[in-house]
Amino acid sequence: MSASIQIKRLNSGDANFKATLMASLSLPSADDNAIDAAVMGILADVKARGDAAVLDYTKRFDRLSSANTAKSVADLEIARGDLEQAYLQLPPEQKNALDIAASRVRAYHEQQRIEAGCHSWEYTEADGTRLGQKVTPLDRVGIYVPGGKAAYPSSVLMNAIPAKVAGVQEVIMVVPTPDGARNPLVLAAAWLAGVDRVFTIGGAQAVAALAYGTDTVPAVDKIVGPGNAYVAAAKRRVFGTVGIDMIAGPSEILVLCDGTTNPDWVAMDLFSQAEHDELAQSILLTPDAQFIEAVQSSIDRLLPEMPRKDVIRTSLTNRALLIQVKDMAESCAIANAIAAEHLEICAQEPRKWAELIRHAGAIFMGNYTSESLGDYCAGPNHVLPTARTARFSSPLGVYDFIKRSSMIEVSEAGAQALGKVASTLAHGEGLQAHARAAEMRLKK
């Protein structure tokens, strides 16, 4: 057995526990200014030079060789027919898995569209005044699909399908292809999800192209999807020109366990986020000290088997936490303070403890609900708030691809009553034109 992985341990009974926990949740920020400066330059360049700048940055950052160097951004677009061929040529097992995942994601978001207020409504008051809300889908959205350290066909489904369910007219996908390598599963997922156009560009230059538009890449109304630190910085910078879903940080998992779950399962669940990248964070909360030791043993035994063991080891060593708490109720209170992206409740009464959870991107209940099922095929969206933003934001959904307009039709009778109210309030604010506009409609 290899040497034990050194993972930071905390105890909720320690005097400085809260401060230590909050410090452990923070990300290093030494490179933020450098990244932001680089992104600002790229955004300005793409805004000024359009396609030429996008092509230059794509050649540089994706290491396109002379053999596959595109002569224009148009050469970086993948034809719809090629997407279909990628889907049709998938091995049967992959094709079936993608079909099932897409079907479940679509079914969930169809239900969400019905249940989450994603439709127009109105009511009529006694005097004939009609008030309501008109819901319309966005015209065009851009979805960013990561393509650096790994390929993510699941991200294609999770971003594109709710947009299409919402009724978005055109979905533009961008995906980096380092060294010119195109992943067939990603292209197949784009076909299955109904993506309209795909460009093999990534990074801040792809965000800029979507936000500002070029001669080849159309400007969109909103950009969604996760990416690296440069993509996150670019999305933050273009917000206001376009809408964005969220600023996504490194992936996180928080496991609440009463000590009754197979420790190998918990260890692998912690690995499932740690393997994303070195900055991902995996945390275990349990009242059982012996269970922490069992999970540590499972980690040490299982890690050498993992293909991405180096990434996992770095993530666990630098950012993971094994926390002993007083009881499960306290673990729920701590979980609310952490507000994790993924929250697993591995316990005999998971719904009892879920009732106490107020802040989490997604809640996975029961020993058989691994976080990976949510990532791929359970149905709910896997684009989730990170870095404690689950305190005030939600998973990506159909509601992110619609907008609401208030509908107001005041009857003549209604104007008599409301006009007096508006007049009084407008005079109180010193806005006489507002008051007169209401008064002129009053009967003499």
Image (cartoon, rainbow, N blue to C red):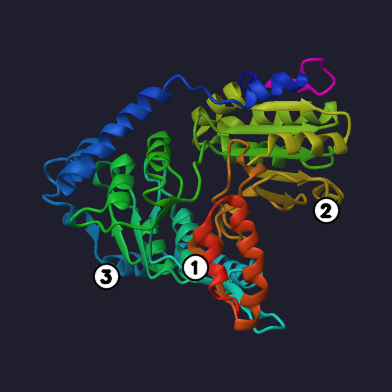
- Point out the tag, 1 or 2, that comes first from the N-terminus: 1
Most foreground residue, 403 or 147: 403
Q: Which residue is mark 2?
A: 351
Query: Three-letter amino acid code at disc 2?
Result: Arg
Please tell me which residue is depicted at 50% across the width and 65% down the height of the picture: 402
Q: Which mark is residue 81?
A: 3
351 sits left or right of 79 in the view: right
Q: CA distance from mark 1 to mark 3?
A: 20 Å
Q: Which residue is mark 1?
A: 96
10 drawn magenta: yes
Most foreground residue, 166 or 309: 166
Q: Report the span colored magenta.
A: 8-16
Most foreground residue, 116 or 111: 116
- Point out the tag, 1 or 3, that comes first from the N-terminus: 3
Q: CA distance from mark 2 to mark 3?
A: 46 Å
Please tell me which residue is depicted at 42% across the width and 34% down the height of the picture: 229
Q: Is residue 63 visible?
A: no
Query: Three-letter amino acid code at disc 3?
Result: Gly
Please tell me which residue is depicted at 33% across the width and 41% down the height of the picture: 203
The image shows residue 324 at horizontal and vertical percentages of: 81, 26
* Label 3: how many Cα within 10 Å (few below 14, some 14–19, many 20+): few
